[in-house]
């Protein structure tokens, strides 16, 4: 399947051959439009599968901190891609401008954004002024007179959505766009989507990248469609009609020869259209700041991995001192960019496009020293330690240690580097001594959170840098680098425990296989009779490959020995009996072992010498002789796209499985063989369809074997989206712990291009935000409530408190020299510093507008296994509305602790002499808040009994079994109302026996007010009617109906009602209707409880509250009860922004999906 770039080259070559002297002319607007439509709409999966999801995930956090957004789009085409974003993102786009040089497209774009189209898909209905669309190219000149950029216009977002074809040099256009972004601290982003072309951006550094290597264009296989498509790809037509018609015939042949045919699309041709997203910020031009202090690689750098060779990094720096590595980290943190690291350069992501790579090659020293008297007792049979720096290769370490009679159990390739040791390391000593990462007992690491140098585990004092410190989480960090070490810091050196160097007995042989049945039988015998019977000091690797028109099974039998008597012992009898072997073993040392590998000399004439390129992924298998596994292994070779592809089966077991899965980060321990799926092609075919097909084959076989595997090898995996599924099985039971450590040790994702780890999975919990004035007793109450939760007799709960302000105090103390211990524990000292602390925090937030969210998530991720987290020290107004979307699977409740003025003064140590026993200032200050907390606790009395009673009556009910019973009645429906959405069918509660009665009881009992003071229950159609009517009957109060316009008799009051959340999901469009209620159904001073089934975006509820306001009901007299809340849609925040922050909203259930 040809890429569009290779198709363009082939089409233009054909034009040169067939009409070398015939003049060419540009496409007409209609020809261009027809071709563009095929490329952008006709069977193109890229928009729905990549561009829209990536753009949405990028913009959600960016838009969250801004009330309005201005966008400049470069070359949007006939419709803006922004019009297809979710509604809650589109509503923030208030100003839109565009450069669209094609007049036909500009007219179509302007029409799609016009007033009469504002409710249709593809529109931006919340623009505050008409869109400014210019029918001209985005020029490197000033675009004088265009009105865009000429008068200093600034934008938050500048978007190149349809590639940058024709813009040269491309970096200059991006640099111009960067100058048009709004100033810091808010800043902005330039977002580029580009198809099927390597970009040279002259050192611009990406803030974020993403790729879509599987993008495909489907073109109808008929003459008319192919003519439109080929013209568009070529970019021209021939001036003379008869010449052009003759060329069209030839171009159709080219398309049909290079396109791929698939059974699923019998009438179409498929072309590869890989896409990338590149995000730039004003920091993207900061590379000179780094290269002024850190040396660059001199000349061309040799990279082993052919995939990495195709990437264009922003720069490759080669630090020669640890301080250079620290400079790299501090630079990355300052400018909010990622880093890649080069060790042995076998990884496909050691170089990444437009990212700075750190070549650790200058750190190439190996030291062998004696362990100290109190050092590690490894049981390895030696008293030595090996310190290997991160630029060393496996072959270097083996040669150096052999000279001292030692070895380290590293991998089977001499040129691999630190990435192997840190992420596993499967070699021929694995069954005897374990993996390479198992031999790591210490390391020197540069933190990617601070740039601080750490020594962890066992590092001899003379090998510790002068400024290195042992981190508080030493044990966690050592555990993490033993199997996932490329994710948590930049490793400068590791300490290995060595073993006595063995001599190896090795024999290779090849068994030709007559057919598939024979192949399956041989695999079964090899698994059950050979591999199973070998002792730990021996291993049997197998190669399954095709050669000379026949399937072959190659076997390498290796025995490691440190004594003469062992060398005399041959492999077990069953092995020889099954495979009819004769003696013929060869004795080699550790260096010689590298050259005996079968893939080097025994397959296809040898894969060594740089004649081939390869791509690999590795899965762990048990029982390769079982029918389902053996069948898939044999079928894999039968479907190989290149004659050179093979499967390599490395034997495991033994010492690999002796380590508990949780003992190191490398959690995949239960396997018999590591199956390395290896796609190989001649090196002169790099970048061709043959190479692409080999890569696709590797991923297809890996996907096919994944359900039968016990894990995947993380050392190969990186940012490629095809690795995401494989990465879910990379670390066995350790993924959750690794995810937490990643967030803790690399919170800014500096090492974003290592094996992907999931975001920390947060256990659904109750998060109580304890707010109130200083002196109200927040910390005291929180501690008492923790004791109530931890002592709950009916259910085992774990609870603890944490202060969100502690992070600010630590940073304040570091900057000012204040005593941190006293800030945390001494009330008088803290009160003395409070004004300065407040000013310090506000300055921080001005520079880092997402700092409150980060502090909140830091606390949550540090306590993932708790049932209840009580957070004190909150500074944010309406914290539930502000933070709940960040933890959509958890319930957030604000408890406001208040006390009278006299009590506050006493607790603060301020005696005013006022003899009043108690004032109501707590109430007056609560009234002054712009929101109403979920719960309020009056803390004027002494003693803890009243504090405990509050927890028992108001907080423990959140853990009542009836709530879980109700949650279990809510069905989760996947892919409804459209793919990718998991729908929560709340109304299904009513369809289950006892469901409505249970729900009504919970609504009555969980209401935080007094039902005797409520005048009516209000609800809108249709979901609310179901539950509100039953509740009104139960509590004995009237129900007020809110309906669509025209369904109630006059007189009535009405407001505009937007489309509900689910309706907008199903249609993809946002429309409006009207709500109304009877005018005099409620007195002006009535107290109302609004009941609804779901709170998602909050639009419907906002309309209900507006309607009640029109009827004269004050917000303070309204409460809301909903069955299910979906915090990810930020409904509470919408209500607050529309002036309804003082309406108390309670929800029975919380879900993290639609």
Image (tube, helix red, strand yellow):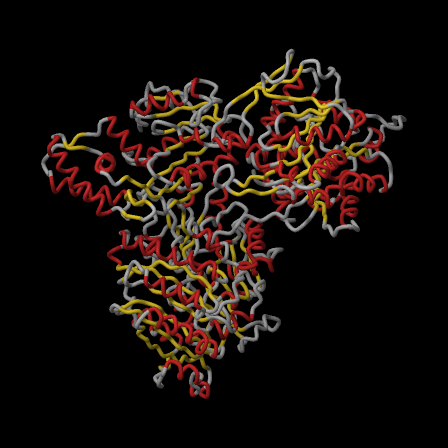
**Who's the residue at 79% across and 37% down the image?**
777
> Going by the image, does 383 lie left or right of 1030?
left
Give the answer, above or below, for where 493 lies relative to 38.
below
Rendering quarter of residue 46? top left
**Who's the residue at 30% across and 43% down the image?**
197
Tell me, yes or no, if residue 18 can be seen here.
Answer: yes
Along the line of sight, the residue nearer the viewer: 889 or 736:
889
Residue 28, position in %: x, y?
22, 27
Tell me, yes or no, if residue 817 can be seen here.
Answer: no
Rendering quarter of residue 101? top left
> Going by the image, does 890 lie left or right of 628?
right
Residue 554, position in %: x, y?
34, 73
Q: Quadrant of the C terminus?
A: top right
Residue 1091, position in %: x, y?
68, 29
Along the line of sight, the residue nearer the viewer: 732 or 625:
625
Give the answer, above or below, for where 1012 lies relative to 544.
above
Question: How many tags in the picture?
Answer: 0
Q: Outermost residue, top direction?
A: 1051
Residue 172, position in %: x, y?
33, 34
Q: Outermost residue, left direction?
A: 21
């Amino acid at each position: 399947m040809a890429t569009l770039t290779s198709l363009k080259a082939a089409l233009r070559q054909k034009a040169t051959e067939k009409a070398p002297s015939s003049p060419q002319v540009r496409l007409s607007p209609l020809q261009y439009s027809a071709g563009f439509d095929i490329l952008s709409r006709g069977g193109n999966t890229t928009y729905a599968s990549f561009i829209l999801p990536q753009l949405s995930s990028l913009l959600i956090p960016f838009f969250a901190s801004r009330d309005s957004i201005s966008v400049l789009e470069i070359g949007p085409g006939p419709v803006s891609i922004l019009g297809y974003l979710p509604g809650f993102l589109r509503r923030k786009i208030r100003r839109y401008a565009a450069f669209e040089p094609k007049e036909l497209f500009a007219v179509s774009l302007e029409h799609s954004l016009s007033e009469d189209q504002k409710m249709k898909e593809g529109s931006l209905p919340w623009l505050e002024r008409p869109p400014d669309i210019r029918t001209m190219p985005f020029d490197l000149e000033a675009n004088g007179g265009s009105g865009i950029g000429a008068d200093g216009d600034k934008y938050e977002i500048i978007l190149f959505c349809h590639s940058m074809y024709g813009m040269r040099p491309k970096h200059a256009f991006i640099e111009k766009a960067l100058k048009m972004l709004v100033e810091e601290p808010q800043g902005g982003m330039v977002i580029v989507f580009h198809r099927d072309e390597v970009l040279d951006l002259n050192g611009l550094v990406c803030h974020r990248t993403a790729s879509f290597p599987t993008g495909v264009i489907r073109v109808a296989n008929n003459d008319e469609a192919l003519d439109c498509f080929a013209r568009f790809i070529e970019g021209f037509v021939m001036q003379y009609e008869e010449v052009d018609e003759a060329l069209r015939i030839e171009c159709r042949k080219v398309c049909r020869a290079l396109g791929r045919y698939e059974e699923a699309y019998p009438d179409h041709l498929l072309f590869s259209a890989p896409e990338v997203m590149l995000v730039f910020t004003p920091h993207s031009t900061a590379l000179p700041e780094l290269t002024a202090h850190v040396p660059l690689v001199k000349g061309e750098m040799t990279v082993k991995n052919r995939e990495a060779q195709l990437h264009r990094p922003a720069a490759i720096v080669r630090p020669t001192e640890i301080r250079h590595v620290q400079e790299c980290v501090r630079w990355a943190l300052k400018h909010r960019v990622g880093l890649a690291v080069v060790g042995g350069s076998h990884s496909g992501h050691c170089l990444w496009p437009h990212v700075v790579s750190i070549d650790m090659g200058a750190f190439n020293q190996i030291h062998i020293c004696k362990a100290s008297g109190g050092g590690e007792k490894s049981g390895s049979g030696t008293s030595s330690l090996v310190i290997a720096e991160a630029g060393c290769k496996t072959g270097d370490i083996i040669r150096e240690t052999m000279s001292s009679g030692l070895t380290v159990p590293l991998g089977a390739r001499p040129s691999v580097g630190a990435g192997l040791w840190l992420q596993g390391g499967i070699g021929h000593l694995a069954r005897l001594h374990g993996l390479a990462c198992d031999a790591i007992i210490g390391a020197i690491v540069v933190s990617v959170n601070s740039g601080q140098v750490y020594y962890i585990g066992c590092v001899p004092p003379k090998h510790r840098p002068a400024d290195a410190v042992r981190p508080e989480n030493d044990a966690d960090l050592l555990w993490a680098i033993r199997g996932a070490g490329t994710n948590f810091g930049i490793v400068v050196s590791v300490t290995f425990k060595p073993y006595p160097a063995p001599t190896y007995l090795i024999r290779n042989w090849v068994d030709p296989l007559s057919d598939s049945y024979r192949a399956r039988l041989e695999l079964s015998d090899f698994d059950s009779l050979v591999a199973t019977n070998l002792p730990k000091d021996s291993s049997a690797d197998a190669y399954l490959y095709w050669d000379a028109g026949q399937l072959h099974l190659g076997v390498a039998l290796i025995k490691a020995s440190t004594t003469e008597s062992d060398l005399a012992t041959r492999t077990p009898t069953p092995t020889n009996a099954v495979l009819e072997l004769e003696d013929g073993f060869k004795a080699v040392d550790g260096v010689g072992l590298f050259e005996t590998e079968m893939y080097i000399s025994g397959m296809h004439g040898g894969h060594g010498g740089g004649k081939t390129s390869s791509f690999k992924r590795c899965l762990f298998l048990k029982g390769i002789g079982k029918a389902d596994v053996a069948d898939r292994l044999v079928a894999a070779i039968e479907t190989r796209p290149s004659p050179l592809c093979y499967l390599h089966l490395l034997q495991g077991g033994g010492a690999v499985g002796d380590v508990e899965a949780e003992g190191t980060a490398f959690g995949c321990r239960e396997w018999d063989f590591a199956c390395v799926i290896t796609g190989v092609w001649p090196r002169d075919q790099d970048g061709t369809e043959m190479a692409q097909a080999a890569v696709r084959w590797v991923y297809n076989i890996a996907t096919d074997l994944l359900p039968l595997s016990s894990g995947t090898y993380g050392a190969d995996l990186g940012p490629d989206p095809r690795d995401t599924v494989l990465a879910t099985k990379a670390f066995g039971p350790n993924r959750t712990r690794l995810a937490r450590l990643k967030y803790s040790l690399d919170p800014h994702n500096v090492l974003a291009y290592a094996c992907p780890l999931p975001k920390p999975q947060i256990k659904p919990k109750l998060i109580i935000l304890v707010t109130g004035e200083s002196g109200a007793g927040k910390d005291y109450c929180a501690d008492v409530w923790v004791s109530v939760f931890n002592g709950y007799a009916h259910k085992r709960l774990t609870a603890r408190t944490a202060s969100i302000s502690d992070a600010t105090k630590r940073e304040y103390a570091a900057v000012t020299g204040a005593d941190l211990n006293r800030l945390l524990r001494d009330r008088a000292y803290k009160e003395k510093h409070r004004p300065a602390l407040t000013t310090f925090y506000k300055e921080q937030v001005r520079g880092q507008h997402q700092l409150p969210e980060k502090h909140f998530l830091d606390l949550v991720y540090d306590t993932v296994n708790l049932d209840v987290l009580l957070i004190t020290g909150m500074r944010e107004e309406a914290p539930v509305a502000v933070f709940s979307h960040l933890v959509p699977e958890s319930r957030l409740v604000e408890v406001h602790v208040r006390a009278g003025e006299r009590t506050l003064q006493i607790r603060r140590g301020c005696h005013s002499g006022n003899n009043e026993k108690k004032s109501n200032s707590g109430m007056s200050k609560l009234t002054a808040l712009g929101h109403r907390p979920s719960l309020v606790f009056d803390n004027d009395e002494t003693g803890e009994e009243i504090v405990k009673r509050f927890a028992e009556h108001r907080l423990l009910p959140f853990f009542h079994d009836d709530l879980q019973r109700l949650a279990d009645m809510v069905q989760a429906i996947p892919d409804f109302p459209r793919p990718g959405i998991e729908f929560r069918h709340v109304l299904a509660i009513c369809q289950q026996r006892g469901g409505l009665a249970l729900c009504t009881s919970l609504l009555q009992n969980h209401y935080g007010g007094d039902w005797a003071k409520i005048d009516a229950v209000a609800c809108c159609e249709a979901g609310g009617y179901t539950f509100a009517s039953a509740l009104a009957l139960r509590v004995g109060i009237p129900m007020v109906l809110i309906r669509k316009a025209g369904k109630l008799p006059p007189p009535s009051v009405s407001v505009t009602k937007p489309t509900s959340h689910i309706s907008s999901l199903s249609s993809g469009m946002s429309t409006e209707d009207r709500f109304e209620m009877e005018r005099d159904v409620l007195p002006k001073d009535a107290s109302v409880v609004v009941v609804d089934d779901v709170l998602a975006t909050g639009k419907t509820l906002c309309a209900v509250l507006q309607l009640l306001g029109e009827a004269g009901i004050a917000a303070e007299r309204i409460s809301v009860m909903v069955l299910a809340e979906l915090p990810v849609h930020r409904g509470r925040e919408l209500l607050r922004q529309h002036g309804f922050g003082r309406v108390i909203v309670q929800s029975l259930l919380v879900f993290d999906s639609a």
